Amino acid sequence: MRQESGFNAIYRNSIEIGVAGLPTGALDIDDGGLWLGQTQSAVGSFSPGANCLCRLDETALHDDDLGQKEINRRYFLTRRLKELEREGLQTNMASTKLDDKGALVNARLDALEVQFAANQNALLGRFQNIDDSWTT
């Protein structure tokens, strides 16, 4: 939503396509909840005339700045999993993020409770032999 730097970035296929400066500080949250793909003056402030004319897939919210290298890595792994699924390999794309003891992690993003749907260790375990040089 908002980073401490006050900048948000949008990526398409791991390429940064837009950056916007936003005021830092707590989010305004209304009862309606978060609507992706809509202009909102506050989270949950629903306006039917503010719909985004686009398609959203693989949408993710993070509580920190991932950086370009990490975005590239995640995009590559997700794309490779989809290729494997098309080839008939069953993958679990909806795993849950775990802490170092294996317990579920519920991350708090300001007043929004977000349960992350990515167990990086399990995902990376599937690709132990992939050369990491593509990210440099």
Image: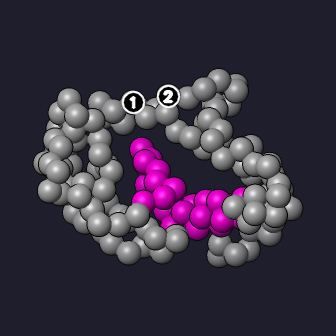
Residue 103 vertical position relative to residue 60 in the rendered view, above or below? above
How many labels were placed on the picture? 2
According to the picture, the residue beneath numbered tag 2 turns out to be: 106
Choose the circle earlier in sequence order: 1 or 2.
2
Residue 25, given in percent of the width and then of the height, sits at: 20, 43
- Pointer 1 and pointer 2: residues touching (CB < 8 Å)? yes
Along the horizontal axis of the image, is 95 left or right of 16?
right
Label 2: element kind: loop
Query: Which numbered circle lies on residue 15?
Result: none
Q: Amino acid at mark 1?
A: Glu
List x then y, in percent, for residue 33. Answer: 27, 35
Q: Label 1's element?
A: strand
Q: Decide if residue 89 is in sight here.
A: yes
> Label 1 crowding class (10 Å Cα cut-off): few <14, some 14-19, many 20+?
few
Asked whether residue 29 is drawn in magenta, I would say no
Please give left or right for residue 42 compared with residue 6 in the image.
Answer: left
Residue placed farthest to the front in the image?
48
**87 horizontally vs 13: left or right:** right
Q: Which residues make up the magenta segment? A: 56-81
Query: Which corner quadrant holds the C terminus?
Result: bottom right
Rendered residue at 25%/66% (across/down) = 20
Amino acid type at image mark 2: Asn
Q: Residue furthest right?
A: 129
69 within the magenta span: yes
Q: Which mark is residue 113?
A: 1
Residue 120 visible in rendering: no
Q: Residue at x 80, y 69 (%)?
A: 131
